[in-house]
Amino acid sequence: MQMANEKICDEWEDDLQKERTFWENQIQSDVENVQMAFKRLQEFLDFKEKSEKQKLMQEKEDVMNSLAESQNELMKQREAVRDLISDVEHQLDCSTMEMLQGVNSVLTRSQTLRLKQPKMVLREKRRIFQASDLKGMLEVFHELMDAQHYWVHVTLPRVYKKNVIINVDKKQIQHQNKNTRNRRMFSIFGTYDLGVLGYPAIHSGKHYWEVDVSRSDAWLLGLNDGRCAQPQHHGLNKKPFKVMYNSVVKHCVYYQPKHGYWVIGKKNRSVYNAFENRSVTHNASVLVLSLTHPPSRVGVFLDREACTLSFYDVSNHGALIYKFCEPSFPNTVYPYFNPMESSEPMTVCGPPS
């Protein structure tokens, strides 16, 4: 009986030790998560503080330059007035005949001299930083933080398309142009699809992944309904639309939701676009995005319940790049990656450890 009780106590001791270890690990993990969250928040606040200060210093420089120009203009006007006064005084010291001979010149100069009030900087148009601005910034930051809770491991498929290279761990994709004659085919957004589908397939719920595009000077990424993986869908059966570039008409594939694409892209090293369902007659299906910073890392967040697909500039603390709002998505969609004509890779990123 005593031995049985001793055994029970030993078991309880083991259970207590396991419980102690569990709580130590759990709380330590929570502490690390809190530290990481506050570190990211502090980095975000430091970044925004630096950005706001830079804006103010730039404003100060612009104002000082403007006032300096006004000061220079005022000095020129003052010099002109002084010269006129000096000439008048000089005429007064001359003989009557010399004075009469020079009076017309002095009168003409005095009549044509027009003083202009120096330009001032309008104070009413100043943008002053408010606490509400910080609130909006934090809302954007928290939106990205919330999306990152739904991070999924996305991988690329085996190579099955000409001119597309995918590395061994199925995380990097890039273009390899073996035929230089075809290079101009990709100058806008390709006449056939070099894109591949990422996995897993998405049927429901919320999903988030990130893509490093820092080295790539042209890319497309977002979602596809799976048709781009079909050979007959590689742009050969699509009706292209015309786009004018430097007075030359070129053709572009419809990378639009109605064709199974929800994507944004970059071309010509600095031009960013989103593709929407717009009127064919207005060439408005390619929307030019105005970004304050070129994104080097893009976060993609699909919320099937809300029927939204959002793109975030992770390298700019979660600034929203673009958001698709749809009535619904197809039953199955896939992450989509297209290296376009870039020989440098775009890389699927894993969640932070």
Image: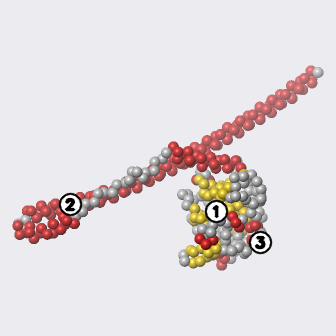
Between the residue at mark 2 and the residue at mark 1, the CA separation in whole angstroms equals 61 Å
The image position of residue 89, as x and y in percent, is 12, 61
* Residue identifier under label 2: 81
**Earlier sequence position, callout 1 versus callout 3:** 3
Residue drawn 18% across and 64% down?
A: 110
Observer-nearest residue: 35 or 49? 49
Residue under label 3, please give it: 231
> How many residues crowd around disc 3 within 10 Å: few (fewer than 14), some, or many (20 or more)?
few
Q: Tell me the amino acid under the disc marked 3.
A: Pro
Q: Are marks 1 and 3 in contact (CB under 8 Å)?
A: no
Kind of residue at disc 2: Val
Q: Is residue 338 visible?
A: no
Q: Nearer the viewer, residue 169 or 303?
A: 303
Q: Quadrant of residue 300?
A: bottom right
Q: Is residue 178 above or below residue 256?
A: below
Q: Label 3 vs label 2: CA separation?
A: 81 Å
Labels 3 and 2 touching (C-beta < 8 A)? no
Q: Earlier in the sequence, mark 2 or mark 1?
A: 2
Q: Which residue is mark 1?
A: 264
Q: Secondary structure at mark 3?
A: helix
Residue 221 drawn above or below residue 37:
below
Q: Looking at the rendering, which quadrant does residue 69 occupy?
A: bottom left
Q: Name the spot of residue 263 as percent of width and height, x first.
A: 66, 62
| Label 1 Cα neighbours within 10 Å, binned few <14 / some 14-19 / many ≥20 | many
Which part of the image, by quadrant, shows the N terminus?
A: top right
Q: Which mark is residue 29?
A: none
**Amino acid type, mark 1:** Ile
Q: Secondary structure at mark 1?
A: strand
Q: Nearer the viewer, residue 294 or 11?
A: 294
